[in-house]
């Protein structure tokens, strides 16, 4: 039944979320305000401009538009990424375990300029048949568009895809697309309600075992 795994990128494949939080706090400081953990959690996994609208509103920033704040953040993030990032534990193992058995894709709310830096730096791009960035997505997560489009590009029906996500917005998008969703929340998201997901794992190692169980029942 299952033919593909679709991976979120930030916080799922690559440990980028601490960098996003650091940059979010730095930008708020530039505007004489602070950004709370609650705001940063709310932004996770969402379409970039939507996330920055939440950021501007909740931080009380009025001297810059959401687009200007987004541009500022992306310049800073590219600089951080260029310094190097770490893959999440178990990423290479899950790719090696299912390579040749399932198709692989990335479906990320990040722009192509981020995937173009991050995936080659980890030498991972060759694993994936599809890398779907946010650049040509109209409705960001939690809307299902990105997962529907990624499945179509894989030539796989959405209900034959396994989606791995770390955020509520991303897991909701996969669920709405009709995929089998395994939530792998970061510690900062551990108390969020992922009960709508089809499964939950502590890490990619545990997710790999759950996928193996699913395939054994195919």
Image (tube, rainbow, N blue to C red):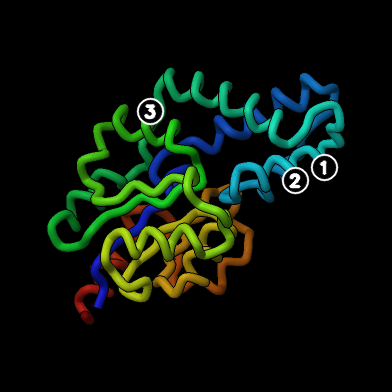
Q: Position of residue 111 (x, y in %)?
A: 48, 38
Residue on which disc 3 sits: 117
Q: Position of residue 148 (x, y in %)?
A: 42, 65
Numbered label tally: 3
Residue found farthest to the bottom: 217
**Residue 63 appears left or right of 126:** right
User: Disc 1 vs disc 2: Cβ atoms closer than 8 Å?
Assistant: yes
Q: Position of residue 26 (x, y in %)?
A: 70, 23
* Up-down relation of residue 91 to residue 161 (above or below): above
Residue 215 lies in quadrant: bottom left
Q: Position of residue 173 (x, y in %)?
A: 52, 64
Tell me the quadrant of the picture where the N terminus can be found.
bottom left
Q: Secondary structure at mark 3?
A: helix
Residue 67 visible: yes
Q: Residue sitting at 70 percent across and 30 percent down?
A: 69
* Up-down relation of residue 83 to residue 86 (above or below): above
Which of disc 3 and disc 2 is earlier in sequence? 2
| Residue at mark 1 to residue at mark 2: CA–CA distance | 5 Å
* Up-down relation of residue 18 to residue 100 (above or below): above
| Residue at mark 1 to residue at mark 3: CA–CA distance | 30 Å
Q: Secondary structure at mark 2?
A: helix
**Callout 3: 10 Å neighbours few (<14), some, many (20+)?**
some
Q: Residue sitting at 70 percent across and 29 percent down?
A: 68
Tell me the quadrant of the picture where the C terminus can be found.
bottom left
Which of disc 3 and disc 1 is earlier in sequence? 1
Residue on which disc 2 sits: 54
Q: Secondary structure at mark 1?
A: helix
Disc on res. 57: 1
| Residue at mark 2 to residue at mark 3: CA–CA distance | 26 Å
């Amino acid at each position: 039944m299952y033919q593909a795994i679709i991976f979120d990128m930030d916080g799922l494949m690559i440990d980028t979320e601490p960098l996003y939080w650091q940059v979010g706090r730095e930008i708020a400081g530039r505007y004489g305000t602070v950004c709370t953990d609650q705001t940063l959690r709310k932004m996770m996994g969402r379409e970039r401009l939507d996330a920055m609208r939440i950021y501007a509103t909740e931080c009380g920033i009025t001297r810059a538009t959401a687009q200007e704040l987004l541009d500022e953040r992306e310049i800073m993030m590219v600089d951080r990424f260029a310094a190097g990032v770490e893959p999440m534990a178990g990423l290479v193992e899950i790719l090696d375990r299912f390579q040749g058995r399932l198709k692989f894709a990335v479906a990320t709310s990040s722009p192509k300029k981020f995937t173009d830096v991050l995936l080659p730096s980890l030498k991972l791009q060759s694993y994936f048949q599809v890398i779907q960035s946010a650049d040509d997505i109209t409705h960001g997560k939690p809307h299902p568009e990105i997962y529907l489009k990624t499945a179509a590009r894989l030539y796989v029906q959405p209900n034959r895809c396994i989606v791995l996500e770390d955020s509520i917005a991303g897991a909701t998008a996969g669920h709405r697309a009709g995929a089998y969703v395994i939530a792998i929340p970061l510690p900062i998201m551990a108390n969020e309600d992922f009960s709508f997901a089809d499964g939950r794992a502590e890490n990619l190692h545990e997710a790999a075992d759950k996928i193996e169980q699913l395939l054994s029942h195919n």
